[in-house]
Amino acid sequence: MSENPFPLSKDDLLKAYRTMRTIRDFEERLHIDFAKGDIPGFVHLYAGEEACATGIMMHLNDNDRIASTHRGHGHCIAKGVDVHAMMAEIYGRSTGACRGKGGSMHIADLSKGMMGANGILGAGAPLICGAALAAKVRGDRGVGITFVGDGASNQGTFLESLNLAAVWNLPVVFVVENNGYAESTAMEWAVSCDSYVDRATGFGMPGVTVDGTDLFAVHEAAGEIIRRARDGGGPALLECNMVRFYGHFEGDAQTYRAKGEVEALRASRDCLVMLAERVVEAGVVARDELHRIDREVADLIEDAVRAAKAAPLPAPSELLTDVYVSY
Amino acid sequence: MSRKISMKTAINEALDLEMRRDPTVIVMGEDIVGGTGANGEDDAWGGVLGVTKGLYAKHGDRLMDTPLSESAYIGAAVGAAACGLRPVAELMFMDFMGVCFDQIFNQAAKFRYMFGGKAQTPVVIRGMVGAGFRAAAQHSQMLTPLFTHIPGLKVVCPSNAYDAKGLLIQSIRDNDPVIFCEHKNLYGLECDVPAESYAIPFGEANILRDGDDVTIVSYGLTVHRALEAATALAKDRIEAEVIDLRTLSPIDWDTIIESVERTGRLVVVDEAHPRCNLATDIAAFVGQNAFGALKAGAQMVTGPHTPVPFSPSLEDLYVPSAEAIAAAVRRTLSPTGSRSHGIAA
Amino acid sequence: MSNERIKPIVMPKWGLSMSEGKVTGWLKRPGDHVALGDDLLEVETDKITNVVEAGESGVLRRVLGENDTVYPVKALIAVLADPDVSDDEIDAFIAGFVVPAADADADAADATPRYLFAETAAGTIRYATRGEGGPAVLLVHGFGGDLDNWLFSIDALAESATVYALDLPGHGQSTKSVADPSLSGLSAAVLAFMDHVGLAKAHFIGHSMGGAVSMRTALDAPDRVASLSLIASAGLGREIDHGYIQGFVGATSRRDLKPVLETLFADRGLVSRSLIDDLLKYKRLDGVEDALTAISSAMFADGAQSSVLTDLIAAAKTPILVVWGEEDRVIPAAHANALGDAARVAVIPNAGHMVQMEASSKVNALLKDHIGKAA
């Protein structure tokens, strides 16, 4: 093995690869099982965007909070939410992370600092300001990260939150996951500015744009602004340019995308392949080591699906519980 | 010890006592300190009507002015509550709920259920409700039915200073999101209030007047109109029982049903618009659960199906009057007069 | 206009906060002869219903107070007069009757605050004082009670005594932190209060647990207790309705509290909405539940009274009066005889645990007589 030229230890590199592989396999399995009709409702897949969640979450601990989006599976896995509990939730089972009451769009695990995927676009931004405020009041050096897509970056909640976080000097990082599409509408058409850095500047905070398919780029940029926020330096915005391998939701024929667009992206900008090639080429990690992770992850996902399918549905009495702490 | 103070002072006192008792209680809102960043006094306003005046001097940065940005700060209060604080966010006029309702009904109200019982969101959103302040259509609504409709929210609307203090303290200690509705025309009303802390449990209506002939159910300002009506009716030997709901969610069905089973007549008074409000809700519930006890159709006295008008001459017609309530009572007592149609009060 | 042969009957003022009362029924008819002390009518206040007794004798010539009608305190509700007084004279008297101005009343109330607060070694103690001169009398309420339990006694006793009524620690509007929830602890708080107001010695009147506190004080500080009047007193036997104690401590709603309070009276109808509301207001105060729990575990653990002072107090030299309501459902009336010859005993029929409220005139007469003889 050669000397490690990366800013991440070999251990961290393997962890990052495992996280990204887990997200990828989780989503691809859902893609297949959803088409079979096994999964109720609708799901939004994070495949292709793994480097963003992984690169950011490597800087966080369980005391740091994130507020996710409708496309939240990747954020959950990277933040450490249990894969079995997630799968069971998506299958609507009583063993799910939310006991089958939330589903794909509301997976949460507050013990891991995961404040929930969110079906309302842009809703996470004010919530994470509150999480950051709580950390600030307690003085526990916690930070809050909120994710929005390029679409929800136009929501008033998001823009108001940029201002609030700057005015209150909150330890928040606003991550714009720019995959080019708000559902079917192109970012170039729907977002009035050319660069999110300009938006950040307009709200009096630093903004950084990185290639969201490059784990190292995301990791480095996120590391700097998260450290700054943790040290009381205030909020910042991080734009990650990334690619979406599947439609807005499963079943989306993606007729708004150019012919061959997705195939070209998969061939040239697959963050998982790019990471694997770089670490193997540099001689830091052996391909066999990655294959072993691949097999372990495949087994994990298979086991999660098997367990989810075997798990009981919520009891009828569950319909009426958990509305209030006490009523 | 107990002394006479206004509802405004009682609310201030509740916030003060709970901030002293529990360091996780924070209070935020537009101008609730007043003048933050400006060159004048530190504590210039204490809220538009001065409800939080003086608290900044006692609690410093735990009292936070916000940018004029309801979505952001109401959401921040909700997020902070989910992360272990007990924020009290003032929404100035409840009508402003329109711009931040998502953070309340899609986020705060649903966290616990949506997350399988693994979250709690002890946030209090307090603000002014009600007409009679010459504040026109966007600063005068009684939106309580809207909030009451949403599972996961608790809805409180005190009618006096004693209740306001005890219910606000309970709201802050409560582990669920609470919408605390303060009728702006009751702020100045004084009554005996203990100086100590006390909490009034939710879901227990208050019986303000005993009577055997008819049950009048209301909440907020119109409780006082109902009492006026009852006093007038007593001159004609009609004894009305007056029930103040105090909390609309949870609601004290038992007290309402027990009273109607005794009196056989029901008049429900709600300042809100006439469709799908507390009056329709209670009349329907009693119709379903105590039909046999009713000697006449339930009567509803509400605001009309219009926005709140500005001109004093019109606004005075808007809020249910003691005369309208008394007339409704008389309809329940007249064998032929119990029908009333239309959507106006 | 004054006419000594015409005697007005006015709406009475019972206790400290009464401003009006409702006539609920006349027990004498116009034309009836009325002797001093006869029951005249029933009046309902926002606290309780009670009987108005005739303060003078004569013929009930006019009844002005209508049933189910509310009158302010001191309003003319009836006229007594000798048979030979003419109707014209009575009409003139009624026409000329002036209800004392409310303002004057309010001024008087301001001059003597309804409630006072003493900062004692045992914490803040609320109290009221009435009357001037004569012997000093101290009223000590029972478990969960407060000085308003003496609503119908304090003014009557104050006619010939200087009366103090206090809220024990953990009760009423006194401090809710109870340093020592035992009888000795509460007795020490009473002594601290006496020190604060400069009361060297007093005739103690104790109700229920307050009776036990008074006995404890008489035993621990005999020179400060001139006499004991023990009303439905604790400390004279083991038995107590523990369900009442638990129910009172545990109740948080009107619905829970009402049946509990009904055990206090022979006539359950006396438990008014306002009585329940006032107690709920007290019970909701921070610290009350803890205080009541501490006191009840110290005094009424295992479903019985922890301290029986019968032998000790019988051996003491203090003059003792024991008064009980025959229908007491909290502490059995049989305890009235526990002291044998060591005490004067009166068991009053048709009254329950709150006998001093339910049969106030009888109890007040007994108390005055006892204090008068002991003084």
Image: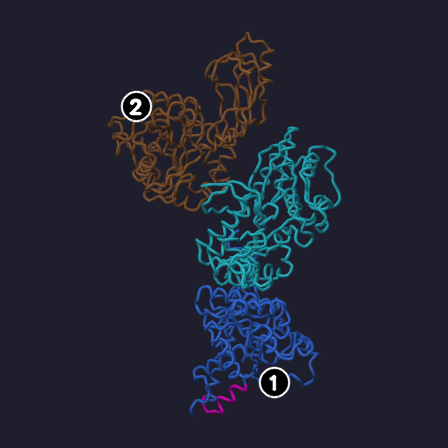
Chain colours: A blue, B cyan, C brown
Residue B263, located in which quarter of the rendered image?
top right
**Which residue is depicted at the point 64% across and 71% down?**
A154
The furthest residue to the left: C315
Left or right relative to A193: residue C341: left
Question: Given the image, on which type of amino acid does mark 1 rest?
Answer: Arg
Tell me, for residue A281, which label it has, or none.
none
Residue A298 appears in the figure? no
Q: Position of residue B62 (x, y in %)?
A: 48, 59
Q: Which residues are magenta?
A: A273-284
Q: Position of residue C106 (x, y in %)?
A: 51, 31
Q: Position of residue B106 (x, y in %)?
A: 60, 61
Disc 1: which chain?
A: A
Residue A117, located in which quarter of the rendered image?
bottom right
Q: Which residue is mark 1?
A: A266
**Which residue is depicted at the point 57% across and 83% down?**
A211
Residue C20 appears in the figure? yes
Q: CA distance from mark 2 to mark 1?
A: 102 Å
Q: Secondary structure at mark 2?
A: loop
The furthest residue to the front: B40
Question: Given the image, on which type of amino acid does mark 2 rest?
Answer: Ala
Disc 2: which chain?
A: C
Q: Determine if the magenta segment contains residue C53.
A: no
Q: Which residue is mark 2?
A: C343
Left or right relative to A168: residue C165: left
Q: Determine if the magenta segment contains residue A282.
A: yes
